[in-house]
Image (cartoon, coloured by chain):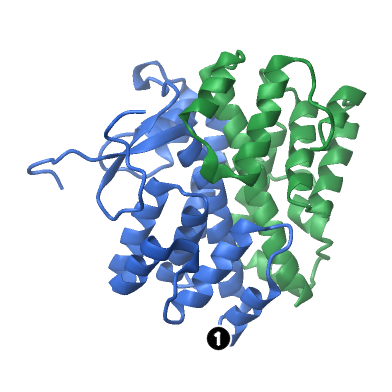
Chain colours: A blue, B green
């Protein structure tokens, strides 16, 4: 365990350091290269994608699935999906995922009080609607998919979500049950060093 | 990546009993791409062309164990049947029960411990848990294979849990 590892939820920019050796880009197979191209990136291939490229056939299906769940048109708002992602990431303590998706929610919805409250009180956060209903559903489904709470489900209907929107939220939460189990277990978040002139 | 139409019935439709033309079937088809890649991801995790150090019957038995850990009986039944169809031996089938006695083989013990931890308490996982896997003889790719299998099956468990409420309420 090294000193620069981040253990608390934060909006600060983070890097991710893997526990296993990533695939080396120079030695990647054609299948691995093909699988890695699916993930859009402006700054080269991230260590996370290079780690997942060990299983190129899984990565090749996962990337378009992830993108469709988070970015498809219609249905639940982009911000609503980010709230589902954030709820899962808080329960599963994926500090990196929570930071990224809290920032995206903030950018889309401009409700910093919601993010502050979630980072401070985590699963007990008290929020305004619709954040509360979306967040509580995500926390509950993530915490116990064997016996998910019907109250949290009905609350989604009460705030006016239709079936497509609810299905979109279910998948946003579920795909972060997936992402958190990769990112939080295969590596650790570190503070991004100051990059003058970058971005 | 898109050139193989799923040859078998959609697994989520099958375990939830979603009939063609039913309201939930029509809803799922509004997200056809998502539905398609959920199925291809299932094949990639459970039935890869090159299973390498994780034989297909073991993958199915571990998936059944995860589903049972979360008390998703419909998925546990599916994966137990899959393990049987793949001619899993008795020792492999026993792994489907999280309460079964731990096997002697240290590699398999380490795998089961990781499956149970990351399924039920992913928040608790640390660097030491990966070290335990590599210490038991898993290589880097094995670690990513196992993580990918656990992560996918848990996605499926969450989807089934959520869609079951849309089906029932």
Residue matched to label 1: A160
Left or right, residue B82 beside residue A33: right
Left or right, residue A34 beside residue B40: left
B122 and A166: which is toward the camera? B122
Q: Residue at x 70, y 16 (%)?
A: B106
Left or right, residue B76 beside residue B135: right
Neighbour tally class for label 1: few under 14, some 14-19, many 20 plus, Cα within 10 Å: few
Judged from this view, the residue extending furthest toward the left is: A197
Q: Height in image: A169 above or below A130?
A: above
Q: Quadrant of residue B57?
A: top right
Q: Chain of mark 1?
A: A
Residue A132 placed where, x, y %? Answer: 48, 76
Q: Residue at x 7, y 44 (%)?
A: A197
A82 and B2: which is toward the camera? A82
Residue B78 placed where, x, y %? Answer: 84, 46
Q: Height in image: B137 above or below A164?
A: above
Q: Residue at x 54, y 28 (%)?
A: B129
Q: Would you say residue B23 is visible in this rendering?
A: yes
Residue B144 placed where, x, y %? Answer: 54, 28
Q: Quadrant of residue A15?
A: top left
């Amino acid at each position: 365990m090294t000193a620069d590892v981040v253990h608390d939820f934060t909006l600060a920019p983070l890097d991710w350091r893997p526990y296993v050796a990533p695939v080396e880009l120079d030695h990647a197979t054609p299948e691995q290269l093909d699988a890695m191209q699916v993930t859009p990136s402006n700054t080269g291939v991230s260590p996370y994608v290079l780690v997942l490229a060990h299983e190129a056939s899984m990565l090749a299906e996962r990337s378009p699935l992830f993108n469709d769940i988070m970015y498809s048109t219609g249905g639940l708002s982009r911000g609503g999906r980010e709230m589902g992602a954030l709820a899962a990431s808080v329960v599963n303590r994926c500090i990196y995922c929570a930071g990224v998706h809290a920032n995206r929610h903030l950018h889309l919805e401009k409700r910093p009080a919601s993010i502050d409250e979630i980072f401070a009180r985590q699963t007990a956060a008290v929020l305004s609607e619709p954040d509360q209903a979306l967040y509580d559903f995500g926390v509950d489904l993530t915490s116990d998919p064997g016996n998910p709470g019907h109250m949290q489900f009905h609350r989604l209907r009460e705030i006016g979500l239709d079936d497509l929107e609810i299905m979109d939220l279910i998948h946003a939460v579920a795909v972060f049950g997936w992402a958190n189990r990769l990112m939080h277990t295969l590596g650790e978040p570190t503070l991004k060093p100051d990059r003058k002139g970058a971005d | 990546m898109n050139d193989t139409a799923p040859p078998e019935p959609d697994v989520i439709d099958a375990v939830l009993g979603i009939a063609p033309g039913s309201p939930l079937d029509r809803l799922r088809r509004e997200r056809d791409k998502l539905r398609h890649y959920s199925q291809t991801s299932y094949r990639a995790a459970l039935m890869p062309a090159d299973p390498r150090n994780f034989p297909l019957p073991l993958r199915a038995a571990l998936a059944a164990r995860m589903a049972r850990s979360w008390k998703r009986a419909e998925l546990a039944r599916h994966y137990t049947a899959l393990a049987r169809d793949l001619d899993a031996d008795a020792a492999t089938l026993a792994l489907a029960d999280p309460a079964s006695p731990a096997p002697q083989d240290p590699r398999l013990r380490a795998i089961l411990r990781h499956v149970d931890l990351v399924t039920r308490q992913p928040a608790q996982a640390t660097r030491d848990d990966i070290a335990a896997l590599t210490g038991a003889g898993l290589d880097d790719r094995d670690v990513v294979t196992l993580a990918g299998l656990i992560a996918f099956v848990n996605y499926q468990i969450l989807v089934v849990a959520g869609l079951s409420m849309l089906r029932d309420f």
